[in-house]
Image: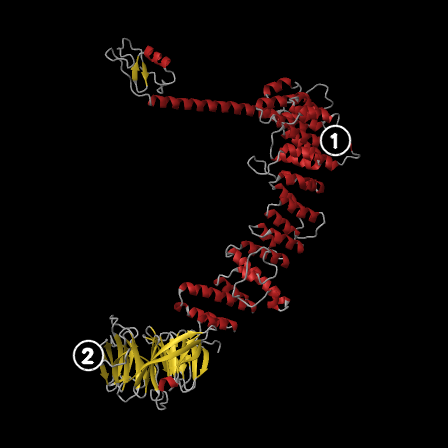
């Protein structure tokens, strides 16, 4: 037994009922409100008034007052009593006769044939099919015939409505609507007296024991089955509930939802209709009657009347929870749903679920506990408060009263078992994450997030950084000391940053990089700080920590500025001039930043281009001054300088030439002369000093790019002239000239070349040049002829279209007038306005002079 559902309370004692009459016994009872009627074996009916009272400790007691007793004069026991409160009548079975008695004075009603004789048993239809509220339907078992009769009982008469034959003589009856549940001599049946349909249930021997047929709800009955079972059966003949197992000697049963109460020779047993388990046993000897009346359960011995008082449902549930019977408590709660107002049930149900969750939590059944917390809509702070120091110091939370559990805190629950403590903390992490993701924190986001941060920090959990990097409500005053305590300094910086304290965040991170604080969360923290500064909108903070970053690694530190947005609408935009000025003490960083401005952002500002070129040149000159010069570094530095000199057109050329001085930077010097349009000097350097024919040819191509074919031709002729200058040593220059002509025949004017070539040169040497020049000339001529033909064709098409849209002739005669002056035409000369309207030439000219902006002739035709 797991719950105390009822208490046995005396209602009417022996002395009050029968005094000193030793042979008088109780035969039947009926209860209607506060009124109790008792039928005895000496044919008396007693009327008592029962008053129920409850003590301060919740104890229920009854006081009874005898109002009246009446002798019916039949000299037989009163077998059954049923109240018809709407009629103020008692229906009485005595000496096989049904009588109708006035409830107030217990006088029998004699008018209208208010008696039915030959009755073995009867029952009242608690689900009547007759719509008259002042009429009671009863079903009776005839003592002489195998029939069941349906009667209508009125205030002053009794009227038979239906008679139904049965296969065997019934010995017990119950009625619900049109359905009769009967105990025959050998079996139970369900009979529909409206349609005559019959449904056999199961066999039963009425000779061995008294049958029990009890209506327990709409179209549902409780029957005593063989084997000591209480069977449930519906009007369709099926069972929707599992049977209850009571004793073989059960003599009566009653229902007080959600319990079935059974009476046998020595005990009262209480079974749940929800799970069919035995819940309570009460010792009670000499019991003869057990009956339920409008939610009350009364039972009697032969001499006294008792009431089974149900304990409040909430107390029963709390007793089950106190005994750790969680599932039984929840089943009982769910079963009571239909009997409790919706709002009250919802409040009670949520609290019971929460209590059940804490019981399971204490048993480390976390999965089940979490489900109960979720369904019970637990204030998550109730759970957090079990963990010391997790709730913020300023939290206004107080635990529920009465309390939902018996634990002071987690240490009390775990009893010093650190394994349990860790398991509980892992559960809380999981639960808080689910609450957070499902937005179930119900306005207590700060408490939830702060507790989660503390758990993450304590457990060195990988999700700590994710929490701080996302939208969170962690309280800074509580969270910062906790992170410091657990040496989570990088996370502390993230917390400061989320709360808008970037300076504080950077102070912590810088101390980690400098080795003042130990935190190995990020091995690339320096790079992270640089990246952070590059997107920080607070320029004061950026300038404050830029020097630290640049001093540590200029190549990385300069990314603070190179990664920053340069668009006007972006927050945190820096002025490049300010940055360049700031970086003067960091040459490497300055070069990288200028490269960013010039080569990547393509900023068209002369000072940046000139400064970058100067820095490149200084680097080259510095390397050349070393002894010995590092060849690879010189090559790389000169390549950078040469690329910038070729690609940029914004630097100050003469300044760089002067700065270059006497350094043997011939290639760079030639490029600078080219920028000054001093191509003769440039080519002279390349041909005579550098002696690099390919560089000279490349120069001609580079310098004439996007300048037109004539400009390019002039440069190549200059180069050819240098190769053909008299006094050139050896045969090198003529060979270079021939190679130049043969490779770039399309870039030369063939006629001019032939005029300057020495007469003794072999045509065989110049064959590629001559072939190419001839082919180029022929190609140009044919291309021009083709273009001319296409132009003529297009012109012809345009003439055709013009003639097609010109229209017919315009007729002018002496009878037609001008539309402007309205005078007739005296000569054929005229002008047509748009739409083919003829006017005098002088009228049209005058009109054009008067309104030149409004008179625009759209018709090009001058046909007259």
- When the figure is inspected, residue 98 is found, relative to residue 479, above or below; the finding is below
**Residue 164: image x %, image y %?**
24, 80
Q: Residue at x 30, y 18 (%)?
A: 836
Outermost residue, right side: 627
Quadrant hosting residue 675: top right
The answer to whether marks 1 and 2 mark residues whose Cβ atoms lie closer than 8 Å is no
SS label for mark 1: helix
The one nearer the camera, 184 or 581, is: 184
Query: Residue 210, percent across and down?
Result: 35, 86
Q: Which mark is residue 621?
A: 1
- From the image, tell me which residue sits under label 2: 112
Identify the residue shown where x is 23% and y is 82%: 116
Q: Nearer the viewer, residue 603 or 327?
A: 327
Q: Earlier in the sequence, mark 1 or mark 2?
A: 2
Q: Alpha-carbon neighbours of circle 2 within 10 Å: few (<14), some, or many (≥20)?
A: few
The residue under the point 58% across, 50% down is 469
Q: Is residue 181 something that shows in the picture? A: no
Across and down, in percent, residue 198 comes to 28, 78
Circle count: 2
Say which element carries label 2.
helix
- Which of discs 1 and 2 lies nearer the camera? The answer is 2
571 versus 186 height, above or below: above
Q: Is residue 178 at least partly visible in the picture?
A: yes
């Amino acid at each position: 037994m797991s719950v105390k559902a009822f208490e046995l309370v005396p209602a009417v004692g022996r002395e009050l009922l029968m005094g000193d009459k030793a042979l008088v016994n109780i035969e039947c009872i009926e209860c209607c409100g506060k009124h109790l009627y008792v039928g005895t074996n000496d044919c008396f009916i007693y009327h008592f008034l029962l008053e129920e009272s409850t003590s301060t400790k919740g104890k229920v007691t009854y006081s009874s007052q005898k109002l009246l007793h009446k002798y019916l004069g039949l000299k037989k026991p009163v077998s059954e009593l049923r109240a018809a409160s709407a009629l103020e009548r008692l229906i009485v079975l005595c000496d096989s006769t049904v009588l109708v008695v006035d409830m107030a004075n217990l006088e029998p009603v004699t008018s209208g044939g208010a008696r039915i004789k030959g009755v073995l048993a009867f029952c009242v239809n608690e689900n009547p099919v007759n719509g008259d509220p002042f009429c009671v339907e009863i079903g009776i078992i005839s003592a002489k015939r195998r029939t069941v009769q349906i009667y209508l009982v009125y205030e002053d008469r009794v009227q038979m409505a239906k008679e139904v034959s049965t296969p065997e003589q019934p010995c017990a009856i119950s009625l619900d609507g049109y359905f009769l549940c009967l105990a025959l001599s050998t079996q139970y049946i369900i009979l529909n007296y409206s349609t005559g349909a019959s449904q056999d249930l199961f066999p039963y021997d009425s000779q061995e024991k008294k049958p029990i047929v009890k209506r327990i709800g709409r179209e549902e009955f409780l029957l005593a089955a063989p084997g000591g079972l209480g069977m449930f059966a519906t009007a369709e003949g099926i069972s929707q509930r599992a049977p209850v197992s009571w004793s073989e000697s059960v003599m009566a049963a009653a229902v007080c939802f959600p319990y079935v109460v059974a009476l046998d020779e020595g005990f009262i047993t209480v079974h749940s209709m929800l799970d069919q388990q035995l819940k309570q046993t009460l010792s009670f000897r000499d019991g003869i009657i057990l009956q339920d009346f409008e939610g009350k359960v009364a039972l009697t011995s032969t001499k006294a009347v008792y009431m089974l008082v149900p304990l409040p449902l909430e107390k029963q549930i709390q007793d089950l929870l106190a005994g750790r019977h969680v599932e039984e408590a929840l089943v009982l709660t769910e079963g009571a749903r239909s009997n409790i107002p919706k709002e009250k049930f919802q409040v009670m149900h949520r609290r019971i679920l929460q209590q059940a969750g804490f019981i399971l939590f204490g048993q480390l059944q976390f999965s089940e506990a979490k489900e109960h917390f979720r369904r019970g809509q637990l204030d998550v702070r109730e759970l957090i408060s079990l963990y010391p120091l997790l709730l913020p110091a300023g939290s206004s939370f107080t635990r529920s009263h009465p309390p939902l559990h018996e634990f002071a805190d987690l240490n009390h629950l775990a009893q010093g078992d650190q394994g349990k403590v860790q398991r509980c903390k892992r559960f809380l992490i999981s639960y808080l994450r689910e609450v957070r993701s499902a937005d179930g924190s119900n306005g207590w986001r700060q408490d939830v997030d702060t507790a989660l941060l503390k758990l993450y920090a304590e457990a060195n959990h990988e999700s700590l950084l994710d929490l701080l990097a996302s939208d969170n409500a962690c309280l800074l005053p509580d969270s910062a000391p906790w992170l410091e305590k657990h040496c989570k300094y990088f996370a502390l910086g993230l917390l400061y940053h989320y709360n808008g304290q970037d300076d504080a965040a950077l102070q912590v991170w810088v101390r980690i990089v400098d080795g003042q604080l130990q935190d190995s969360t990020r091995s690339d923290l320096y790079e992270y700080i640089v990246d952070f500064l590059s997107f920080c909108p607070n320029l004061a903070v950026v300038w404050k920590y830029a020097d630290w970053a640049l001093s540590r690694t200029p190549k990385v530190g300069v990314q603070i500025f190179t990664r920053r947005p340069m668009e006007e609408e972006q927050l945190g935009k820096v002025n490049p001039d300010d940055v360049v000025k700031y970086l003067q003490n960091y040459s490497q960083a300055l070069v990288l930043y200028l490269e960013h401005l010039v080569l990547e952002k393509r900023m068209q500002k002369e000072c940046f281009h000139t400064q970058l070129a100067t820095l490149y040149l200084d680097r080259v000159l510095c390397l050349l001054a070393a002894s010995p010069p590092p060849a690879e570094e010189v090559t790389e530095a000169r390549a950078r300088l040469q690329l910038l000199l070729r690609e940029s057109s914004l630097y100050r050329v003469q300044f760089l030439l002067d700065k270059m001085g006497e350094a043997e930077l011939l290639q760079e010097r030639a490029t600078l002369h080219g920028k000054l349009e001093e191509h003769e000097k440039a080519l002279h350097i390349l041909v005579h000093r550098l002696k690099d024919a390919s560089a000279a040819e490349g120069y001609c191509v580079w310098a004439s790019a996007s300048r037109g074919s004539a400009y390019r031709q002039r440069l190549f002729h200059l180069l050819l002239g240098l190769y053909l200058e008299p006094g050139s040593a050896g045969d090198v220059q003529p060979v270079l000239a021939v190679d130049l002509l043969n490779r770039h025949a399309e870039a030369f004017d063939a006629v001019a070349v032939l005029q300057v070539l020495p007469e003794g040169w072999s045509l065989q040497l110049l064959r590629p040049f001559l072939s190419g020049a001839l082919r180029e000339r022929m190609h140009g001529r044919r291309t021009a002829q083709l273009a001319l033909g296409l132009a003529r064709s297009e012109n012809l098409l345009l003439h055709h279209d013009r003639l097609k849209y010109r229209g017919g002739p315009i007729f002018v005669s002496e009878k037609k007038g001008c539309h402007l002056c309205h005078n007739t035409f005296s000569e054929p000369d005229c002008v047509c306005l748009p739409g083919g309207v003829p006017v005098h030439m002088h009228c049209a000219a005058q009109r054009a002079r008067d309104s030149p902006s409004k008179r625009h002739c759209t018709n090009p035709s001058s046909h007259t």
